[in-house]
Amino acid sequence: MKHYSGKFISFEGIDGAGKSTHIGFVTDFIRARGVQLVSTREPGGTPLGEKIRELFLHEKMHLETETLLVFASRREHLAQVIEPALARGDWVLTDRFTDASFAYQGAGRGLDRAKLETLAHWVHADLEPDLTFLFDVPLEVARARLDATRELDKFEREQEDFFHATRNEYLRRAAEAPHRFRVIDSTRSIAEIQQELAGILDGLV
Ligand SMILES: Nc1ncnc2c1ncn2[C@@H]1O[C@H](COP(=O)(O)OP(=O)(O)O)[C@@H](O)[C@H]1O
Ligand SMILES: Cc1cn([C@H]2C[C@H](O)[C@@H](COP(=O)(O)OP(=O)(O)O)O2)c(=O)[nH]c1=O
């Protein structure tokens, strides 16, 4: 594994868990400590990646095409944004990374995990997040939050079974890699969650 002085932090969770709500808070918290930080997202994060994101979120396609596209976007993201930032000593916060592919394309859609392992090894054999926040809520809570707020994309319109599988895969990966995952009980209020996040970040910055 490559080691950088800056931290590489990913944010994960099923749609509606509250991930986007907390990324802004964490960004401000870290910047307030004088740290240079790049905040980015997947799929996307580069001009090409944003074009891939549009296709990925809105076109129907074969599961393997979808998976290859998201890893293509990730490859570009690593080359253009993530690795240069870490090499400069900046911190990188990303709204989703490879855990999302295991959760959504793997457990949700049913792609063989071995294929995902192969792609992850190909695209970033020597890099993984130092810290992954997994915002975890039961499905019903996530759904209720989404229904109240916005138009749903292709993934957000998926059925219950899909999100159960997705959530369970995230939790399985968190149990498998406790050194980098922090599972955040996101049924609590935003203020309570932010208090916990601040405590974790205090030990880091
Ligand atoms: N802890 C919380 N309690 C109540 N509502 C929340 C909480 N976290 C997020 N929300 C609301 O739920 C909706 C979805 O949150 P969002 O951060 O967009 O989720 P995600 O990025 O995980 O899909 C938003 O309207 C947000 O304000
Ligand atoms: C990174 C990634 C995202 N996704 C999905 C999860 C989300 O439903 C969607 C977009 O993620 P996200 O940016 O979290 O959407 P929003 O900002 O609308 O909450 O892409 C995958 O299926 N696989 C992946 O590897």
Image: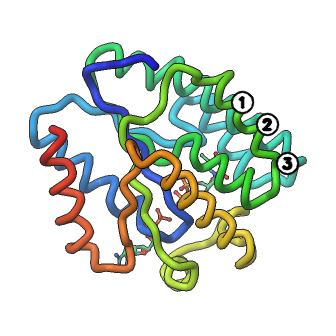
* 125 on left or right of 24: right
Q: Label 2 belongs to which residue? A: 115
Q: Residues within 10 Å of mark 3 (few under 14, many from 20)?
A: some
> Residue 173: which numbered mark, if any?
none
| Residue for point 68% across, 33% down | 71
Of the residues shown, which amino acid type is indicated by label 2?
Answer: Lys
Question: Which comes sooner in the sequence, label 1 or label 3?
Answer: 3
- Marks 2 and 1 in Cβ contact (< 8 Å): yes
Q: Which mark is residue 119?
A: 1
- Vertical comparison of 169 with 122: above or below: below
> Does label 2 point to a residue whose CB lies under 8 Å from ligand 2?
no
As shown in the figure, which amino acid type bears the numbered disc 1? Leu
Q: Using a 10 Å C-alpha cutoff, classify the residue at mark 2 as few (fewer than 14 neighbours), some (14 to 19) or many (20 or more).
A: some
Q: Which residue is mark 3?
A: 63
Residue at horizontal 62 percent and vertical 59 percent from the top: 169
Vertical order, 115 against 147 (above or below):
above
Of badges 3 and 2, the one in the foreground is 2
Quarter of the rendering containing residue 47: top right
Given contact means CB atoms under 8 Å apart, are the residues at marks 1 and 3 in contact?
no
Dividing the image into four equal quarters, which quarter contains ligand 1? bottom left
Give the image location of residue 117, x and y in percent: 70, 35
Q: Position of residue 40 (x, y in %)?
A: 43, 39
Tell me the quarter of the picture where residue 196 sits.
bottom left
User: Does 90 appear above or below 62?
Assistant: above
